[in-house]
Image (cartoon, helix red, strand yellow):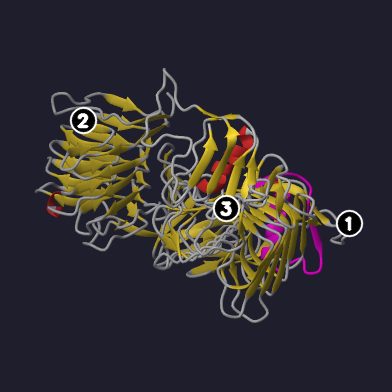
Amino acid sequence: NEDISVETMVGTGESNSFQGTFLGNGKTLTFNYTTSWGSYYCAPFRYVKDATIQGLKVKGDIYTYGYYAGGLVACCYGTTNIINCRIGTVIHNWGNDDYSYYYHSGFVAKHWSGALTITGCAYTGCLLTKDTDANMSGFVAYSQGTSLTITNSLFNPNLNVPMPYGQSVNRDRVFVVWSKNVPVTVTNSYYAYRPEKGEPLGTRVYAIIPGDFVTVANAGDVSNVYADSELTFYTTGIQCGDALYAANGQNVSLTLGSQPDCQVTAFAASAGTLSGSGNPYTLTMPEQNVTIGATNVTVNNLQGEGTSENPYTINNADDWRIFSLNVANNNTYNGEYVKLMANISVSEMVGTSEGNSFKGTFLGNNKTLTFTKGSIENVFSEEQCAPFRYVNGATIQDLKVTGAIYTSKKHAGGLIAHCYNTTYITNCHVSTIIYNDCGDNNGRVRHGGIVGLLNDDSNAKLYIQGCSYTGRLLTDRNIEWCGGFVSGLNYYSHAYITNSLYAPGSIPSGWSTSITNSRTFNCGGGDITNCYHTETMGLVQGTRVLAFATDPGNLGDVVYDYGMMTAYQNGILYDGTYYAVPTLPGSGTEQAPYTISSNDEWNLFANIIKNGFNNYNGEFVRLDENISVSTMVGTSDDRSFQGTFLGNNKTLTFTQGSSESAFGEEYCAPFRYVKNATIQDLK
């Protein structure tokens, strides 16, 4: 009766198997499982006999090092019926020997005996394998029963799932891999993707895709509807979820319309033949996917006049969509102003090409734009991904951006994907996390925390001032050529970054920052002036700083107040946090040593060494007050105290652990690691 997530399999053998009727009730069962080496039979229903399963949706991941994994059933006996089910489980085959025994399938791994009937079902997961010779199929892998019947069903794998390193999409069969003298009947069933091996049963179908500004619906008569598997069969063509499909040569009746906030009066097909002067139109389907585009379109405009005094305004996500549609329709706002009036959440990108790119001035008004593209289960599989996908001679200022991008391609940016000509970004603060799920172009993905790509020409200049990136560039494998601020620069293009901060956030479980040949700020030519970082990414650029809750006292004069950020001579103030090079009072000489007078200054002393700012080699540090501490100084041979510590006859009270909770690591002392050091006159 509810969507649930499980890791337990049902059934332990033929006698202890599920033998009733399971009503999925349109709910989703999330099943995640990792098998051990050489194990047999893995699925949410491990064993069934004379069973019926209907109206169920299943998703999740099965990582198998063994044999016979199924998205729904691992092994079935007797008369088995599967009706109106949608399986989105991704099966990862990690085995790489004895490939002839690796039988995995989207629905049933092994049909052991009896009659198996599958009706009104869709497989929308993906079959991934390390061994390209593994036996995998969308519906049934191994059949040795009395009969196998598949009716009114669709194999429609999601090829945009995250693809772990070393795995590829299965090359084997669509419906059945192997049947041992079993009569197989496939009726009115289709596949939207054809693996390489064998002549598939069923009929190949191709997608009918709505282009920009356009809506598409099948106008034919409905012959069958399976609500839980989200399949609708028409007289001609089928629908899976929101997607339409038809076979080569079919004449499909279509209702064409306009997306909200625009009016389309003429349509065209990218392939095949679109005929008719009004709804319903007829598309004669070719042997390829078809996009239905608009050839005559009018888009609603935003409120305002587009001047600096009375800019166009964006008040909600609908306005952002209108903004995006206008740019796609060649209203690029060149010389005009657009102002964000509220915090909004969006997924539409602005700009579709160099010609249809944003060319105006965007006033963020200190508001937050939350941008999300893709998901952990369905990554965005196109190059150039950002809220501003293409800009050309644009200015963007006073904007905060957050959210997440899940991508398998190149040139994602937290703010802009692709810049042309001279671009100005001022007082923009990006915390978007970019998840790279697939090392495209041999790992050279070229993502940037703020900008993904600056075009390769002598006119391409990028000026970034008073900005910060506090998100993360993440990957599930090693990737290359990313920049904390800017990634893709070429020989002629240059970026100039001033008074800015790179302070990346935490790393979520299961992800890493394994990024080589990368740069802390900028992967190409240009200048970096008065910029700071809390950690490096690849090549060190700018100055290393620590974060302080209060003014550390050594920031110097204000260089520029951007509003949301203040740049100083020796650091940055952003979002209530000070970023500065840490230092103790004093000069470090024997006559004027650095001084420690409090627990906070002792902790700062430890942090300076821990983070590699100073090991005090050749310098003097003096304790000026009796203090009590628990922090240890030094973390390793390289990060050790290497100077002279003057105890000044003061008392250092050090406590670590307790009688109830002892300290459980090696090496415990107030000075945990020292090297070539002197410590004197200390109690």
Determine contact: label 3, label 2, CB under 8 Å.
no
Q: For mark 3, does the 10 Å Cα neighbourhood hold few (<14), some (14 to 19), or many (20 or more) residues? A: some
Q: Quarter of the image holding residue 575? A: top right
User: At x 9% / y 48%, what residue is drawn?
Assistant: 181
The CA distance from mark 3 to mark 2 is 75 Å
Q: Quarter of the image holding residue 76? A: top left
Q: Which residues are magenta?
A: 318-345
The CA distance from mark 1 to mark 2 is 68 Å
Mark sitting earlier along the chain (1/3): 1
Determine contact: label 1, label 2, CB under 8 Å.
no
Residue that carries the numbered disc 1 in the rendered image? 310
For the N terminus, the image quarter is: top left
User: At x 66% / y 60%, what residue is drawn?
Assistant: 531
Magenta span includes 280: no
Q: Amino acid at mark 3?
A: Glu
Q: Which mark is residue 575?
A: none
Magenta span includes 342: yes
Residue that carries the numbered disc 3 in the rendered image? 619
* Mark in front: 1 vs 3: 3
* Mark in front: 1 vs 2: 1
Task: Give 648 or 437, whichever is nearer the viewer.
Answer: 648
Q: Amino acid at mark 2?
A: Val
**In the image, residue 464 lies at what x, y percent?**
70, 64
User: At x 26% / y 36%, what residue is drawn?
Assistant: 43
Label tally: 3
Secondary structure of the residue carrying tag 1 is loop
